[in-house]
C-alpha cells in the first residue's frame, strides 16, 4: 500500500467518523436539552457523563490511529534510516577530511594498538615507560622492507641517552599473514638527544597485497617526570613553556583502519587531571577533538590508589592528526 492510498483511507475514515459522531451527538443533545424523547432525571446525569467520556475517547482514538500519534512501523523505519544516515555522515566527514591530505602511501594499517605502562623508577622523580605495541600492516603498493617505531621530545627536557638500557623485543605471536619469510627487530638506531627510533624488518620485504601481524615491546627508562616540582624545574633553563602536565603523543602518518592508544599508570604515580588535546600542525584540531568527545571515543579513569588509565579508540583517524595525552603528576 503506497502513501497516496493510505492518505485516502485516512480521510475516508475521518469523515465517516464525523458523520456518525454528528448524528449521535445531535440526537443525544436533543434528548438531554430540547425535550425530544423521554429521559428520566436519574438517567440524565449518567447519560451526560457517558456522552462526555465517549466523545473524548472517540476523538483520541481517531487521532491516535489515523494521524500517527502512535509510533508505527514506518516511523521506526524512518528512525533507523536517520541513524544509518548519521553513521554515513561520520564516515563521510573522515573521508572528506582525509582528501585534504591525499598522498601516495605504500601501506595501510588494519590495526595500530599502543599500550603504555608507567611506573616510578628507583629515582622516584622519574617514570619508566614500557610500551606494548601491535601493528597489523598491509602492503598496498610497491614493497615494504621495515616498520619504523620512533618519537621525539625536546633534547633539553629529558634527552634520550645511548648508554641507557633500552629493552626491545619481538613477541612470539608476530607472523606474516600472507607470503612467507621472517620478521626481525633491531636495536635502536637513534637514541640520543631529541629522538628515539628502531625498526622491525621483513625478509623478504612485504609486497603488494601481503599482510603481517607484528607484536613488540620496549622499555624507556627515565622517560617522563614523576613530580610536578621536577617537571617545572627542568623547564626553567629551556625554551619550553612552563606547564603543569606531562604528555605522550601519537601522530597519524599512514592510513589506519583502527587506532587504540592506552596509557596505564601504576598507583605510585599519583596522577590526576587527565585529558586529550588534538592538533594538526601547530593548530588546534577542534573538529576532531569535538568528534572524539561527542562519540565517547576517549575515556579516562583515575583510581583512588593513585593509578589511572586513558584510552582512545578511533576508527579511520584523520591523516596528520596528533593526539596529545596529558596528565598532571603528583607534587
Image (cartoon, rainbow, N blue to C red):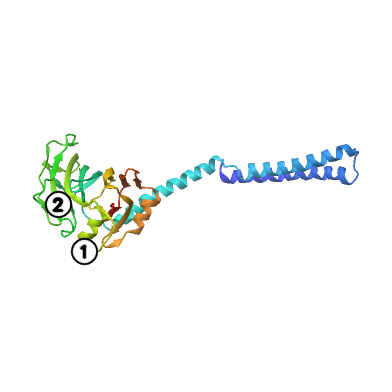
Q: Residue 311 in the image: state x and y as whole percent.
A: 31, 46
Residue where numbered disc 1 is placed:
236
**Left or right side of 30 for 284:** left
Q: Are marks 2 and 1 in contact (CB under 8 Å)?
A: no
Task: Compare marks 2 and 1 and give the one earlier in the sequence.
Answer: 2
Q: Residue 322 in the image: state x and y as whole percent.
A: 27, 55
Q: Is residue 187 visible?
A: yes
The Cα atoms of the two marked residues, 2 and 1, are separated by 24 Å
* Residue positioned 15% across, 39% down in the render: 170
Q: Residues within 10 Å of mark 2 (few under 14, many from 20)?
A: many
Q: Nearer the viewer, mark 2 or mark 1?
A: 1
Query: The N terminus is located in which quarter?
Result: top right
Residue where numbered disc 2 is placed:
196
Q: Is residue 210 visible?
A: no
Q: Residue 73 in the image: state x and y as whole percent.
A: 54, 40
Which one is nearer the viewer's eye here, 205 or 283? 283
Q: Residue 261 in the image: state x and y as whole percent.
A: 28, 46
Residue 116 sits in quarter: top left
Q: Residues within 10 Å of mark 1 (few under 14, many from 20)?
A: few
Identify the element where label 1 is drawn.
loop
Amino acid at each position: 500500500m503506497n502513501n497516496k492510498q493510505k492518505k485516502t483511507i485516512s480521510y475516508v475514515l475521518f469523515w465517516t467518523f464525523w458523520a456518525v459522531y454528528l448524528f449521535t451527538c445531535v440526537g443525544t443533545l436533543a434528548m438531554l436539552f430540547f425535550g425530544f424523547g423521554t429521559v428520566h432525571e436519574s438517567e440524565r446525569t449518567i447519560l451526560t457523563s457517558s456522552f462526555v467520556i465517549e466523545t473524548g475517547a472517540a476523538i483520541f482514538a481517531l487521532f491516535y490511529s489515523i494521524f500517527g500519534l502512535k509510533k508505527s512501523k514506518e516511523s521506526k523505519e524512518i528512525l533507523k534510516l536517520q541513524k544509518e544516515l548519521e553513521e554515513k555522515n561520520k564516515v563521510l566527514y573522515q573521508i572528506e577530511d582525509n582528501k585534504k591530505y591525499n598522498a601516495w602511501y605504500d601501506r595501510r594499517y588494519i590495526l595500530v594498538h599502543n599500550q603504555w605502562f608507567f611506573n616510578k623508577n628507583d629515582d622516584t622523580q622519574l617514570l619508566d615507560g614500557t610500551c606494548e605495541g601491535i601493528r597489523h600492516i598491509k602492503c598496498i603498493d610497491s614493497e615494504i622492507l621495515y616498520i619504523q617505531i620512533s618519537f621525539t621530545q625536546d633534547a633539553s627536557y629529558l634527552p634520550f641517552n645511548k648508554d641507557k638500557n633500552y629493552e626491545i623485543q619481538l613477541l612470539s605471536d608476530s607472523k606474516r599473514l600472507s607470503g612467507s619469510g621472517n620478521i626481525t627487530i633491531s636495536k635502536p638506531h637513534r637514541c640520543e638527544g631529541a629522538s628515539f627510533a628502531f625498526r622491525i624488518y621483513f625478509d623478504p620485504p612485504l609486497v603488494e597485497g601481503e599482510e603481517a601481524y607484528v607484536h613488540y615491546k620496549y622499555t624507556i627508562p627515565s622517560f617522563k617526570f614523576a613530580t610536578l616540582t621536577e617537571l617545572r624545574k627542568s623547564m626553567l633553563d629551556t625554551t619550553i613553556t612552563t606547564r603543569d602536565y606531562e604528555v605522550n603523543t601519537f601522530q597519524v602518518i599512514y592510513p589506519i583502519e583502527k587506532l587504540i592508544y592506552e596509557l596505564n599508570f601504576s598507583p605510585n604515580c599519583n596522577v590526576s587531571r587527565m585529558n586529550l588535546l588534538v592538533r594538526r600542525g601547530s593548530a588546534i584540531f577542534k573538529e576532531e577533538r569535538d568528534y572524539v568527545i561527542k562519540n565517547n571515543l576517549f575515556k579516562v579513569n583515575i583510581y583512588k590508589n593513585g593509578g589511572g588509565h586513558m584510552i582512545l579508540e578511533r576508527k579511520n583517524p584523520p591523516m596528520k592528526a596528533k593526539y596529545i595525552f596529558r596528565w598532571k603528576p603528583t607534587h
